[in-house]
Each structure stands twice: as C-alpha cells, then as structure tokens.
Image (spheres, rainbow, N blue to C red):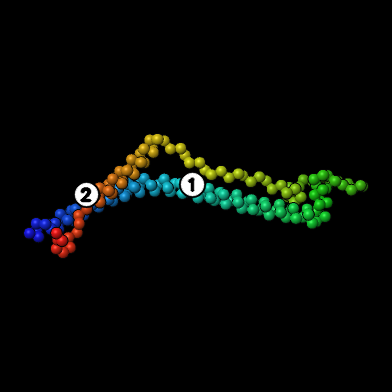
Amino acid sequence: MEKAVAPNPRSHRRLQKAFWLPAVAGLLLFALVTIPPGARRSRALGRDLQRAERIGTSLAHKRQILSEYERALKTDPFFNEAVLREKMKYRKPGEGVIEMNRDDGIFSASLGEVPPFRPSARPPRSLRRHVLNWSLLLASGLLVGAAFLYFDVPARRGPNPL
C-alpha cells in the first residue's frame, strides 16, 4: 500500500526540475527588468554626487578665501589701504600711478562663478516602456508563484499521519 502512495523517485526528480524551471525563469526575468534600470540610475546618481562634491569643495575654498578677506578688512589697516588704492583708484597727493594688469585676485576677492548644481534629469519614459516593464514584472511573479503553487509536493518522512 505504501508504494502506491509514495511518489516514484523518478517522478519526484522530474517534479523538482519542473519546479526549478519556472522559479529560475521568473527570478531571471525579475532581475532582467529591475537590475539594468537600477544600475543606470545608480551611475547617474553617482555622477551627480561627484559633481555636487566638486561644487561643495569649490564653495568651501571660496568661503575660506572670503572669510580671510573679511578678517583682513577688519584688522589690517595696510590691507584696507591697498584695497582702497586698488578699487577706488586712490592716491596720495604727489604720488604717480603706474597702471598694471593684475589678475591675482588678492585685493578684489573675485573668485569666479561657481556653477549651480542641478541634478541630472531622468529621461522621460514612454507608456509602452512602462507597460512592458510592469507586464514583465507580473510575468516573473506569476512564474515564481506557479512554481510554488503547482509544484508544491510535501515531503514524506515517516508514516502518513492520517
């Protein structure tokens, strides 16, 4: 009687293969739908982060120079005189002026513009692409669900409790 109830080892192996086929196919389909777009978005966010860090470093450098400039304006009378001579073209009576081109930025605190940070825009997706992705996700879920529902064979260990 027990031989009639217990599954044949061959059929049990076939059932195991039949289980793994849709389960693996569903998981592969799920990975195919989710991993490449996620990897693309991750790379784009990484590039945005690097760009934001460069801009942040530039702003920190600019802030340091401007705070040193401000400190010098508050405490150093010679620096004040130099800035006054530079910006206001001030000269003492009897002094001659020799015009020179200076781009060192010491007296002017003009450090250039820091580009504004704008995150990269996600490319617009078409409705067809959305429908395809969602249908592939649904198909992968159905394949994995079918593997667990239709091929769920309880293991027989010991005598049947009924």
Q: Residue at x 13, y 58 (%)?
A: 6
Q: Secondary structure at mark 1?
A: helix
Q: Position of residue 123 (x, y in %)?
A: 47, 39
Q: Residue at x 65, y 53 (%)?
A: 61
Identify residue for label 2. Answer: 150
Q: Residues within 10 Å of mark 1 (few under 14, many from 20)?
A: some
Q: Is residue 11 left or right of residue 81?
A: left
Q: Is residue 148 left or right of residue 72?
A: left
Query: What's the amino acid at mark 1?
Result: Ala
Q: Is residue 133 above or below residue 52?
A: above
| Marks 2 and 1, how far apart at CA | 41 Å
Q: Nearer the viewer, mark 2 or mark 1?
A: 2
- Residues 138 and 128: in front is 138
Q: Quadrant of the C terminus?
A: bottom left
Q: Position of residue 46 (x, y in %)?
A: 50, 50
Q: Is residue 9 left or right of residue 110?
A: left
Q: Residue furthest top?
A: 127
Q: Residue furthest right?
A: 94
Q: Secondary structure at mark 2?
A: helix
- Residues 37 and 131: in front is 131
Discs 2, 1 touching: Cβ within 8 Å: no
Query: What's the amino acid at mark 2?
Result: Tyr
Q: Residue at x 9, y 60 (%)?
A: 2
Q: Quadrant of residue 133?
A: top left
Q: Position of residue 159 (x, y in %)?
A: 14, 63
Q: Earlier in the sequence, mark 2 or mark 1?
A: 1
Q: Residue furthest left?
A: 1
Q: Which mark is residue 99?
A: none
Identify residue for label 1. Answer: 44
Q: Quadrant of the N terminus?
A: bottom left
Q: Residues within 10 Å of mark 2 (few under 14, many from 20)?
A: few
Res. 150 visible in picture: yes
